[in-house]
Amino acid sequence: MFLQQLFNSIAIGSVYALTSMGATLIYGILGILDIANAGAYVLGAYFGYLFYNLTGNILIAFAGAMILTGLLGILIQKYVYRPLLSQPAYIPLIASIGIFIFIENIIRLIAGPTIKQFTVKLPFNDLKFTNLHINNVWVLIFIVAMILMFLLWYLLKMTKIGLAWRATAQDIQIAKTMGINTNKVISLNFFLGYSFAASAGILIGILYNSIYPTMGSVVSYKMLAIIVLGGLGNPFGTVVAALLIGFVETMVGAYIGFFIPRNAIAFVALVIILLISPKGLFTQKSRI
């Protein structure tokens, strides 16, 4: 029983990590909270739904949705955030909330307000062991999360792009004087962040067999709780915080019962940990 719940918690925590990673990367490099990332989560789910219905291929659905949503992230960065970077931090935050609301309502107008079934036939079956049954959707979640997290780690730590990325996060003005094209670095940041959120939206849509225009509402504040808990702008901290939230939610539901709403557990954990460590699990010194 515990092993089953543990694997379930890792799977849902992996989705939380993908959902929150975009906002973490963007805060790490620009110091702004991007609530619009939750809109990318919703948009990615709908793009994935569209591509899968057109092709019947889950790989094409993921690739198409992640690329289109990532390109949207670049456009938002270029035409919304870049002109606002000289403004106080709350101005880009308000803009991001506006973008999120705009995305939700555009989806509602184009795709309709009703729930759509996102039924996917995966090319592999469930995994069954003596004391463990792993749903094939959980397997998909784990595979996608591991691939994307490894890609992010490799880019950040093992490539010149990652070096430029870290330099820009440390001090954007000094990075410019050293010849780094910071605009391209930031564009890549947004592309990856929004594509990660898109992948999470697709995974949740497949897991619950449904997508709807407001599916990002809960995600937006849970994402905020996770990135604060992990230490603002810290990718590693975000992964740890996401897995922790997934673990707490799953174990509370399995062994105690939801004496409070499931979606409030993330904030209860956030409050408790911040009382112990006001800077979150990790400080900003280690971000990106």
Image (cartoon, helix red, strand yellow):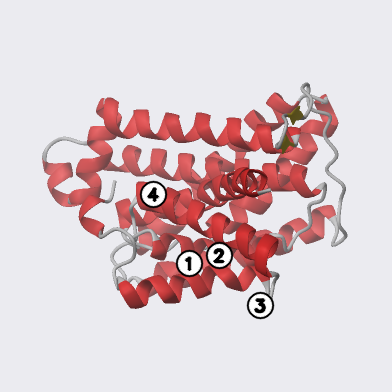
- Residue that mark 3 sits on: 260
For the residues marked 3 and 1, what is the alpha-carbon distance in whole angstroms? 17 Å
For the residues marked 4 and 2, what is the alpha-carbon distance in whole angstroms? 16 Å
x and y, in percent, of residue 114 in the image: 88, 60
Question: The residue under label 1 is which amino acid type?
Answer: Ala
In this view of the protein, can residue 47 be seen by the observer?
yes
Task: Give 280 or 60, whichever is nearer the viewer.
Answer: 280
- Please say if 149 is above or below 253: above
**Residue at left offset 48%, top offset 65%:** 224
Element at label 3 = loop
- Residue that mark 4 sits on: 25
| Nearer to us: label 1 or label 4 | 1
For the residues marked 1 and 4, what is the alpha-carbon distance in whole angstroms? 15 Å
- Residue that mark 2 sits on: 222
Question: The residue under label 2 is which amino acid type?
Answer: Lys
Question: Which sits earlier in the primary sequence, circle 3 or circle 1?
Answer: 1
Question: Which sits earlier in the primary sequence, circle 1 or circle 4?
Answer: 4
Question: Which sits earlier in the primary sequence, circle 3 or circle 4?
Answer: 4
- Please say if 213 is above or below 44: below
